[in-house]
Image (spheres, rainbow, N blue to C red):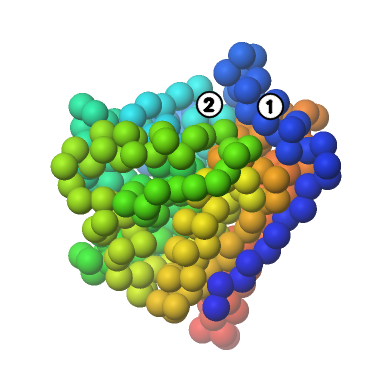
Amino acid sequence: MSIITRIPASPREPDAVRAQMRQVFSDPPVLDGDADLRPVLPDTGGVPGTWVSAVGARAEEGVVVYVHGGGFSFGNPPMERIMAHRLSEATGRPAFAVDYRLAPAHPYPAAVEDVLAVHRSLLGQGVPAGRILLVGESAGGTLVLSALLRLGEAGDPMPGGAVPVSPVTDLAAKPVGGARDSIDPSMMEPIAAQYLAGARPDRAPQSPIYGDLRGLPPLLLAVGGDEILLQDAHRFAEAASAAGVPVNLDVYEGMPHAFHSAVLFAEDARLPTATTFLSRLTGWLAALREPADRTQTAVSS
């Protein structure tokens, strides 16, 4: 059974989050001066990207693989480095921001292959699968779920968990509602067509909801309550739960698509939604580690 948690917001906070999301482009935040951009591991499967480590992050704890959004067709490297830094702070692990190939020049499955290559390269360098965490928002959340399905098909080791934020799980669906969302339903069809370049939208892994979800790792799925993808998230959570996957679905009431970008701002300008997102990520990850830690203690004794 999926665990659905509704995250309330004060009456003024949804508008404040939207204002910060606009500010990201007009007056972008800057990467913290204490962020460490030195490579943590030498090989990322031939896929470019940036390693970002927060103060105190330890490779012994594992690695975060961060997959950015952008409709499968564009990225924003400075913002991606900041997001990777926030994820590193929250998890205590170094993060690798994947610079995957973009549509239309590189349509499906190029980006999925890049995420897979990074994951497999980490395994090849001795990072335990259970200590790899995949995180992605919007199109990046879709790519994370698609990569998990491909790993399952190949029988490869799964990561310890995945955090898809505002993912598209059904490229064949026509989203409705979301009058206050930051994206319009009419945008989804051209985005999907450009990414798929002739591949069917009602097939997995490109549309994860049509795949065999059995064996997927624990998921922390986050979505805004005002999103056009809200029902998509509910459908996927239900399907994954029915397949035996541990799913936590966090619905942030009143929030738009990719609301979590509020975490890009420094702590002194951080809204409660951003603080909550990071703290829930930290708590969820700690809960995942507890059973493994207990098992390790029992084996050692």
Quarter of the figure that contains the N terminus: bottom right
Tell me if residue 296 comes above or below residue 50 in the rendering: below
Residue 79 is tagged as 2
Q: Earlier in the sequence, mark 2 or mark 1?
A: 1
Q: Is residue 172 visible?
A: yes
Q: Amino acid at mark 1?
A: Gln
Q: Nearer the viewer, residue 30 or 243?
A: 243
Q: Judge from the rendering whether residue 5 lies leftward or rightward of residue 64; answer left or right.
A: right
Quarter location, residue 75: top left
Quarter location, residue 110: top left
Residue 250: percent from left, percent from top: 63, 58
The residue shown at (22%, 36%) is: 107
* Outermost residue to the left: 198
Residue 262: percent from left, percent from top: 66, 34
Question: Label 1 near label 2: C-beta < 8 Å?
Answer: no
The residue shown at (49%, 35%) is: 184
Q: Residues within 10 Å of mark 1 (few under 14, many from 20)?
A: many
The residue shown at (78%, 47%) is: 9
Q: Amino acid at mark 2?
A: Met
Residue 114: percent from left, percent from top: 27, 42
Secondary structure state at the residue bearing disc 1: helix
Q: Nearer the viewer, residue 6 or 300?
A: 6
Residue 20 is tagged as 1
Quarter of the figure that contains the C terminus: bottom right
